[in-house]
Amino acid sequence: MAGSSCHHIRNICVFGGSSLGKENEFLESTNHVGQVLAERKIHLVCGGGSLGLMGGVSIAAFLGSSQVLGVVPKALAKGDIIGKTIGEELQVSTMSDRMNAMFNHVDAFIALPGGLGTLEEIFHIFSWAQLHIHHKPIGLLNVNGFYDNLLSFLDQAVEQEFLTSSTRQIIISAATAEQLIDQLQSFIPVINPSMSRINWSTKESRKKLRLDLSLHL
């Protein structure tokens, strides 16, 4: 949902394919994302490496003088599986650690065209937003209608009452980098009263854990 600007985005996480895809427009639009991030002085956090669209946005942002941080699981850092990371590299132990590190470093998320890994990452962040773990804006760069069917699926899920309309509004989409980043910056989350009662505080969770352990003793 758009409204008056409420998000100052300094760091953004971009998910994307490790291949270039079939259409030239995928790489052209990806390179443009990196250029726009640099023009707006937004720093990039990504999954590291230099392959495919992920490498393209990293190179474009880096050449435009944005800081680039690639978060790479140690298993993928060995050999030449994903190519050399552009900018700084943070190595972590697991894929879950990678997601947590990317999440903790950024103010918003963008998904470029991609495959299973890209879909897993964006839906991971989407489901966290649904649960009110965070209220960071999430966007799909819908190049040449790449995400049209996915967006239609989400609309169908609302129609069939598997998603609420407010949850559906969490995902933003646009065809260009400028439009998408503008929408991310003006995004206002819709608060679900039932979800807002959930307490994700680590401190409270630790208290409950200590209580449960005491009860078992």
Image (cartoon, grey):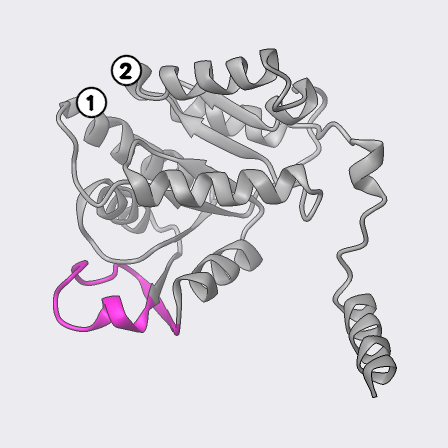
The image's mark for residue 132 is none
- Farthest residue, direction bottom: 217
From the top left corner, tell me how far across and down residue 44 is, in percent. 41, 50
Name the quadrant of the N terminus.
top right
SS at circle 1: helix
> What residue sits 50% from the left and 45% below the top?
124
- On whether residue 74 falls in the magenta region, the answer is yes
Q: Residues within 10 Å of mark 2 (few under 14, many from 20)?
A: few
The residue lying toward the viewer, choosing from 90 and 19, is 19
Residue type pointed to by label 1:
Glu
In the displayed structure, 114 sits above or below 162; it is below
Quarter where residue 182 is shown: top right
Residue type pointed to by label 2:
Asn
In the displayed structure, 4 sits above or below 76; it is above
From the top left corner, tell me how far across and down residue 162 is, in percent. 61, 23
Q: Which residue is mark 1?
A: 25
Q: Which residue is mark 2?
A: 144
Q: Is residue 165 left or right of residue 213?
A: left
Span shown in magenta: 73-93
Quarter where residue 200 is shown: bottom right
The residue lying toward the viewer, choosing from 26 and 99, is 99
Give the mark nearest the N terminus, 1 or 2: 1
In the displayed structure, 62 sits above or below 70; it is above
Residue 179 visible in this rendered orientation of the protein: no
In the displayed structure, 161 sits above or below 95; it is above
- On whether residue 88 falls in the magenta region, the answer is yes
Q: Is residue 202 left or right of residue 70?
A: right
Quarter where residue 85 is shown: bottom left
> What residue sits 55% from the left and 47% below the top?
10
> What residue sits 86% from the left and 84% below the top?
214
From the top left corner, tell me how far across and down residue 144 is, in percent. 28, 15
